[in-house]
């Protein structure tokens, strides 16, 4: 899901059907690609009510936010990105794994890839699976080469197509202009909270979390989803899902 303004993929780019923020479908997609059944995607019913957050197994390893791409948000994004160089990181010493989005309407898949490829979740990717292969091939590549790799990985396209076609709502066409977008937040081993979005110029470090804090802690929510809500311009089409331990 992405808007039509720069730096989104051009209309002629490879396009996917937008992915619904449906935890069951997302979990199925990730497991099909090679994520251990020990993890699952969970609905986050509230980011302000502790009794609702308590339903999610902790620690939560990643948080995906779906939000409307408003004029206020775009202005904020462009301002923050101004003067920032395009990310060129690669290799084993990279602080986070990041892919630039070049596939139209694939931001849901990008968010899921960022969620499982970083922090403790990476350890739950099973060997000899499409995810493991993709990660191994991506590590030594520059961002532009990583994007090309995603476009040329049939297992991603087929698994995404299957999941996106089974949503509870009628799926938009792959070429449709969609004004909702996904962003992922992860905590890496050194405590850094990262904002990972394929529309940006690279990964963004939002601050340091304590050992006892995860992506659903008060500080992480303040630096992440709550900032987006402030820039929502009254549009309340926000939702969140979290990657955490499975309840199966």
Image (tube, rainbow, N blue to C red):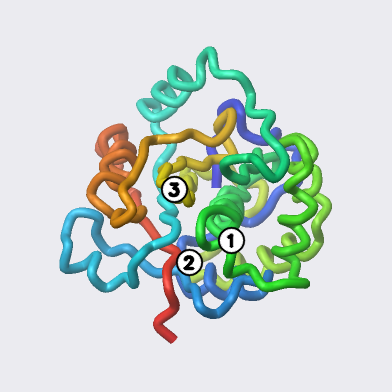
Residue at 41% in and 55% down? 63
Q: Could you say where residue 85 lies in the image, as x and y percent from the top left?
A: 61, 19
Q: Which mark is in front, 2 or 1?
A: 1
- Residue under label 3: 185
Q: Which mark is residue 169?
A: 2
Question: Label 3 vs label 1: CA separation?
Answer: 14 Å
Q: Which mark is residue 220?
A: none
Q: Which mark is in front, 3 or 1?
A: 1
Q: Could you say where residue 169 lies in the image, as x and y percent from the top left?
A: 48, 66
Q: Could you say where residue 217 lies in the image, as x and y percent from the top left?
A: 27, 53
Residue at 45% in and 26% down? 77
Disc 2 is placed on an element classified as loop
The correct choice, above or below, for 203 with respect to 127 in the image is: above
> Label 1: few (<14), some or many (≥20) within 10 Å?
some
- Residue under label 1: 122
User: Who is closer to the viewer here, 188 or 194?
Assistant: 188
């Amino acid at each position: 899901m992405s808007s039509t303004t720069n730096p989104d993929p051009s209309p002629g780019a490879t396009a996917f059907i937008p992915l619904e923020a449906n935890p069951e479908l997302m979990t199925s997609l990730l497991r099909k690609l090679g994520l251990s059944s020990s993890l699952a995607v969970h609905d986050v019913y509230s980011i302000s009510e502790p009794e609702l957050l308590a339903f999610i197994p902790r620690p939560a390893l990643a948080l995906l936010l779906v939000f409307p791409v408003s004029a206020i948000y775009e202005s904020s994004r462009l301002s923050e990105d101004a003067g920032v160089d395009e990310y060129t990181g690669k290799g084993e010493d990279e602080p986070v794994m990041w892919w630039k989005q070049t596939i139209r309407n694939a931001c849901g898949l990008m968010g899921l890839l960022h969620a499982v490829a970083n922090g403790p979740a990476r350890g739950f990717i099973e060997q000899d699976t499409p995810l493991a292969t993709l990660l191994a091939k991506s590590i030594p590549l520059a961002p532009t080469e990583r994007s090309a790799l995603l476009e040329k990985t049939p297992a991603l396209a087929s698994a995404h197509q299957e999941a996106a076609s089974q949503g509870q709502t009628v799926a938009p066409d792959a070429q449709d202009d969609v004004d909702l977008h996904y962003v992922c937040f992860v905590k890496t081993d050194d405590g850094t909270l990262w904002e990972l979005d394929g529309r940006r110029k690279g990964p963004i470090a939002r601050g340091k979390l304590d050992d006892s804090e995860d992506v659903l802690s008060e500080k992480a929510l303040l630096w992440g989803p709550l900032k987006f809500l402030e820039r929502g311009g009254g549009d309340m089409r926000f939702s969140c899902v979290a990657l955490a331990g499975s309840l199966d």
